[in-house]
Amino acid sequence: MVPALVPVLFPCLLTIVSSPQVYEKYIRTKALSIVYYCTSMLVAMSGVYKTETTALIGPMLKPWMDQFSIILEHPVQSEDPNDWSIRMEVLKCLNQFVQNLPGLTESEFMVIIRPLWETFVSSLGVYVRSSIEGTEDSFEGRYDSDGAEKSLDSYVIQVTLMMHLVGSNFYKYFILSNKSF
């Protein structure tokens, strides 16, 4: 069912995610959540349907990576938990792609390196002010209407996981070979 749904659904979800002037962050975050869950299902089936999964995701990866780059390129907004939420969904999708589809992700990964780094750097400042100094609200214990946590800590967990993946031997040469980084 999911393989038949993806070619129709993903372009529609990309339209939602790439239209901040039309859709608020909450809706865009939910669209990214659907991408994450569909991708999870596809990679779970990829052991049996590896070629089909690659054929489905491959052509769609570049526009998604470009959109992820746009979302991550601006500094993290400490006062806006919806900003953390959309970034968290982007990081979850990236984690899914990097871990389970490394061959596909490899060719598109360079577009995301600088925005990913900017997200790490600006997240550190927000984390220090909120969780260490206690000068800003960490929105701990807050949830959206679907029950998804909106705290800074849940966002930091995703950032930490992405940092671990980026630090893996498989992706180190991309980072080290990027002269503009």
Image (tube, rainbow, N blue to C red):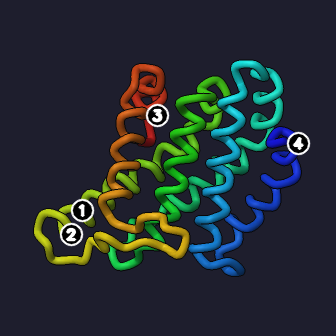
> At label 4, which amino acid type do we have?
Ala
- Of the two numbered discs 1 and 4 in the rendering, the one whose residue sits closer to the viewer: 4
CA gap, disc 3 and disc 4: 37 Å
Residue 142 x %, y %: 37, 73
Q: Nearer the viewer, residue 160 or 1?
A: 1
Q: Name the residue rendered at 62%, 32% in the picture.
A: 105
Q: Earlier in the sequence, mark 4 or mark 2?
A: 4
CA gap, disc 4 and disc 2: 44 Å
Query: Which label number is shown at residue 127?
Result: 1
Q: Secondary structure at mark 4?
A: helix
> At label 1, which amino acid type do we have?
Tyr
Q: Name the residue rendered at 40%, 49% in the picture.
A: 158
Can you identify the residue that label 2 sits on?
Answer: 130
Q: Secondary structure at mark 2?
A: helix
Q: Is disc 1 in contact with disc 4, using a CB cutoff of under 8 Å? A: no
Residue 50 x %, y %: 75, 21
Q: Name the residue rendered at 88%, 42% in the picture.
A: 4
- Density class for disc 4 (Cα within 10 Å; few <14, some 14-19, many ≥20) is few
